[in-house]
Image: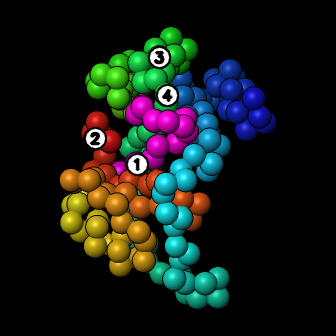
Amino acid sequence: MNTNADTIVERFERGDLSRRQLVAQLMVLGAAAAGASVLPSVARGQEAATGPASQPAAATFSATGIDHVALSVTDAKRSAAFYERNLGLRLVRDGGEGSAFLTTSGSDFLALFRGETPGLHHVSFSIPRYDPDDAARRIEAAGLKLRRSGNRVYFPDPDGLVVQVHAGRGMAS
Protein backbone atom coordinates (compact mmCIF):
# COMPACT_ATOMS: atom_id res chain seq x y z
CA MET A 1 0.00 0.00 0.00
CA ASN A 2 1.44 3.40 -0.89
CA THR A 3 1.67 6.44 1.35
CA ASN A 4 -1.51 8.00 -0.03
CA ALA A 5 -3.56 4.88 0.73
CA ASP A 6 -1.91 4.59 4.15
CA THR A 7 -2.87 8.18 4.91
CA ILE A 8 -6.48 7.59 3.84
CA VAL A 9 -6.74 4.47 6.03
CA GLU A 10 -5.14 6.27 8.98
CA ARG A 11 -7.69 9.10 8.63
CA PHE A 12 -10.48 6.51 8.68
CA GLU A 13 -9.03 4.78 11.73
CA ARG A 14 -8.84 8.15 13.56
CA GLY A 15 -12.51 8.73 12.74
CA ASP A 16 -11.83 11.60 10.34
CA LEU A 17 -13.51 9.72 7.45
CA SER A 18 -16.74 7.77 7.29
CA ARG A 19 -16.74 4.29 5.78
CA ARG A 20 -18.34 5.74 2.65
CA GLN A 21 -15.62 8.38 2.35
CA LEU A 22 -12.93 5.71 2.89
CA VAL A 23 -14.35 3.51 0.13
CA ALA A 24 -14.77 6.42 -2.29
CA GLN A 25 -11.26 7.75 -1.74
CA LEU A 26 -9.63 4.33 -2.05
CA MET A 27 -11.64 3.55 -5.21
CA VAL A 28 -10.56 6.78 -6.87
CA LEU A 29 -6.94 6.31 -5.78
CA GLY A 30 -6.83 2.73 -7.05
CA ALA A 31 -8.63 3.51 -10.30
CA ALA A 32 -6.34 6.42 -11.05
CA ALA A 33 -3.24 4.34 -10.34
CA ALA A 34 -4.41 1.48 -12.55
CA GLY A 35 -6.02 3.46 -15.33
CA ALA A 36 -3.13 5.11 -17.14
CA SER A 37 -1.78 1.90 -18.64
CA VAL A 38 -4.97 0.01 -19.48
CA LEU A 39 -6.68 2.04 -22.15
CA PRO A 40 -4.61 1.46 -25.31
CA SER A 41 -7.70 1.50 -27.55
CA VAL A 42 -8.76 4.98 -26.42
CA ALA A 43 -7.36 7.84 -28.44
CA ARG A 44 -5.20 10.12 -26.33
CA GLY A 45 -6.92 13.36 -25.30
CA GLN A 46 -5.99 16.51 -27.13
CA GLU A 47 -4.11 19.28 -25.42
CA ALA A 48 -6.22 22.21 -24.28
CA ALA A 49 -6.53 24.97 -26.85
CA THR A 50 -5.25 27.51 -24.37
CA GLY A 51 -1.65 27.54 -23.20
CA PRO A 52 -0.31 28.60 -19.82
CA ALA A 53 0.05 32.23 -20.96
CA SER A 54 -3.59 32.42 -22.14
CA GLN A 55 -6.53 33.71 -20.15
CA PRO A 56 -8.45 30.85 -18.54
CA ALA A 57 -11.43 29.81 -20.62
CA ALA A 58 -14.83 29.04 -19.15
CA ALA A 59 -15.10 25.41 -18.07
CA THR A 60 -16.78 23.04 -20.51
CA PHE A 61 -18.89 21.65 -17.63
CA SER A 62 -19.39 22.45 -13.95
CA ALA A 63 -19.22 19.08 -12.23
CA THR A 64 -21.06 18.83 -8.93
CA GLY A 65 -19.53 15.53 -7.88
CA ILE A 66 -18.26 12.14 -8.92
CA ASP A 67 -21.28 10.04 -9.84
CA HIS A 68 -19.45 6.74 -10.12
CA VAL A 69 -16.21 4.99 -10.88
CA ALA A 70 -16.31 2.10 -13.34
CA LEU A 71 -13.62 -0.56 -13.39
CA SER A 72 -12.71 -3.11 -16.03
CA VAL A 73 -12.37 -6.50 -14.36
CA THR A 74 -11.72 -9.97 -15.74
CA ASP A 75 -14.62 -11.53 -13.82
CA ALA A 76 -17.49 -9.23 -12.77
CA LYS A 77 -19.11 -11.75 -10.40
CA ARG A 78 -15.83 -12.50 -8.62
CA SER A 79 -14.99 -8.80 -8.29
CA ALA A 80 -18.48 -7.96 -7.03
CA ALA A 81 -18.12 -10.63 -4.36
CA PHE A 82 -14.72 -9.16 -3.41
CA TYR A 83 -16.12 -5.63 -2.95
CA GLU A 84 -19.12 -6.96 -1.02
CA ARG A 85 -16.99 -9.09 1.29
CA ASN A 86 -14.08 -6.71 1.87
CA LEU A 87 -15.64 -3.24 1.65
CA GLY A 88 -19.25 -3.89 2.57
CA LEU A 89 -20.61 -2.70 -0.78
CA ARG A 90 -24.06 -3.98 -1.72
CA LEU A 91 -24.94 -5.41 -5.13
CA VAL A 92 -27.83 -3.41 -6.57
CA ARG A 93 -27.81 -4.60 -10.17
CA ASP A 94 -26.34 -7.79 -11.55
CA GLY A 95 -25.65 -7.58 -15.26
CA GLY A 96 -24.82 -11.26 -15.52
CA GLU A 97 -21.31 -12.20 -16.61
CA GLY A 98 -20.62 -8.76 -18.10
CA SER A 99 -21.30 -6.24 -15.35
CA ALA A 100 -22.27 -5.51 -11.77
CA PHE A 101 -23.28 -2.33 -9.96
CA LEU A 102 -22.56 -1.94 -6.26
CA THR A 103 -23.32 0.83 -3.81
CA THR A 104 -22.02 2.06 -0.49
CA SER A 105 -24.35 2.70 2.41
CA GLY A 106 -24.77 6.16 0.92
CA SER A 107 -25.40 7.06 -2.68
CA ASP A 108 -21.93 6.37 -4.13
CA PHE A 109 -21.57 3.47 -6.49
CA LEU A 110 -19.02 1.35 -8.26
CA ALA A 111 -19.64 -0.17 -11.68
CA LEU A 112 -17.76 -3.28 -12.81
CA PHE A 113 -17.47 -4.27 -16.47
CA ARG A 114 -15.86 -7.40 -17.84
CA GLY A 115 -12.76 -6.57 -19.84
CA GLU A 116 -9.58 -8.17 -21.07
CA THR A 117 -7.34 -6.00 -18.91
CA PRO A 118 -8.17 -4.87 -15.36
CA GLY A 119 -8.12 -1.14 -14.69
CA LEU A 120 -10.13 2.02 -14.91
CA HIS A 121 -13.05 1.73 -17.34
CA HIS A 122 -14.25 5.31 -16.80
CA VAL A 123 -15.07 7.89 -14.17
CA SER A 124 -18.41 9.69 -14.37
CA PHE A 125 -19.01 13.21 -13.15
CA SER A 126 -22.43 14.62 -12.26
CA ILE A 127 -23.33 17.81 -14.05
CA PRO A 128 -26.43 19.95 -13.57
CA ARG A 129 -29.12 20.06 -16.27
CA TYR A 130 -27.51 17.22 -18.21
CA ASP A 131 -28.63 16.95 -21.82
CA PRO A 132 -26.67 14.43 -23.93
CA ASP A 133 -26.94 16.45 -27.16
CA ASP A 134 -25.76 19.61 -25.42
CA ALA A 135 -22.96 17.68 -23.69
CA ALA A 136 -21.82 16.24 -27.04
CA ARG A 137 -21.74 19.74 -28.58
CA ARG A 138 -19.70 21.07 -25.64
CA ILE A 139 -17.20 18.22 -25.84
CA GLU A 140 -16.66 18.75 -29.55
CA ALA A 141 -16.49 22.56 -29.13
CA ALA A 142 -13.75 22.04 -26.55
CA GLY A 143 -11.75 20.13 -29.16
CA LEU A 144 -12.11 16.81 -27.34
CA LYS A 145 -12.73 13.45 -28.98
CA LEU A 146 -16.37 12.52 -28.39
CA ARG A 147 -17.52 8.93 -27.89
CA ARG A 148 -21.25 8.49 -27.57
CA SER A 149 -23.44 5.53 -26.73
CA GLY A 150 -27.12 6.50 -26.69
CA ASN A 151 -27.57 9.13 -23.99
CA ARG A 152 -24.10 8.50 -22.57
CA VAL A 153 -21.21 10.71 -23.64
CA TYR A 154 -17.52 10.10 -23.01
CA PHE A 155 -14.25 11.81 -23.82
CA PRO A 156 -10.59 11.11 -23.01
CA ASP A 157 -8.51 13.15 -20.58
CA PRO A 158 -4.95 14.12 -21.63
CA ASP A 159 -3.66 10.67 -20.59
CA GLY A 160 -6.43 8.81 -22.41
CA LEU A 161 -8.46 8.00 -19.29
CA VAL A 162 -12.15 7.89 -20.11
CA VAL A 163 -14.36 10.60 -18.59
CA GLN A 164 -18.16 10.54 -18.68
CA VAL A 165 -20.54 13.35 -17.82
CA HIS A 166 -23.96 12.39 -16.56
CA ALA A 167 -27.02 13.74 -14.77
CA GLY A 168 -25.80 11.93 -11.69
CA ARG A 169 -27.12 9.53 -9.12
CA GLY A 170 -28.15 6.98 -11.66
CA MET A 171 -26.95 3.51 -12.40
CA ALA A 172 -26.07 4.37 -15.98
CA SER A 173 -22.70 3.25 -17.15
Q: Real-space Cα distance between discs 2 and 4? A: 20 Å
Name the residue type under label 3: Arg
**Image marks 1 and 2: residues in contact by CB distance under 8 Å:** yes
Residue occupying image coordinates x 55% and y 14%: 86
Please give the residue where the numbered disc 1 appears in the rendered image: 124
Q: Give the range drawn in magenta.
A: 112-126
Give whichever of discs 1 and 2 has the lower sequence position: 1
> Which residue does the numbered mark 3 point to in the structure image?
78
Q: In the structure shown, which secondary structural element does the residue marked by tag 2 occupy? A: loop
Secondary structure at badge 1 equals: strand
Residue 9, given in percent of the width and then of the height, sits at: 68, 26
User: First in sequence: mark 2 or mark 3?
Assistant: 3
Q: Where is residue 110 in the image (x, y as percent from the top left)?
A: 42, 32
Which amino acid lies under the numbered mark 1 shown in the image of this protein?
A: Ser
Q: Residue at image x 35%, y 29%?
A: 99
* Cα–Cα span, label 1 and label 4: 21 Å
Instruction: Specify whether residue 4 is in view.
Output: yes
Q: Name the residue under label 2.
A: 172
Instruction: Give the mark toward the camera: 1 or 3.
Output: 3
Image quadrant assignment for residue 128: bottom left
User: Which sits in the foreground, 68 or 11?
Assistant: 68
Q: Which amino acid does label 4 sit on?
A: Thr
Circle 3: is it few (<14), some (14-19), or many (20+) Cα within 10 Å?
Answer: few
| Residue 12 position (above or below residue 25) | above
Q: Which of marks 1 and 3 is nearer the N terminus?
A: 3
Residue type for callout 2? Ala
- The alpha-carbon separation of the residues under discs 2 and 3 comes to 21 Å
Q: Where is mark 4, residue-wise?
A: 74
Q: Overall secondary structure of the magenta stretch?
A: strand
Please, which residue is most extreme toward the top here? 85
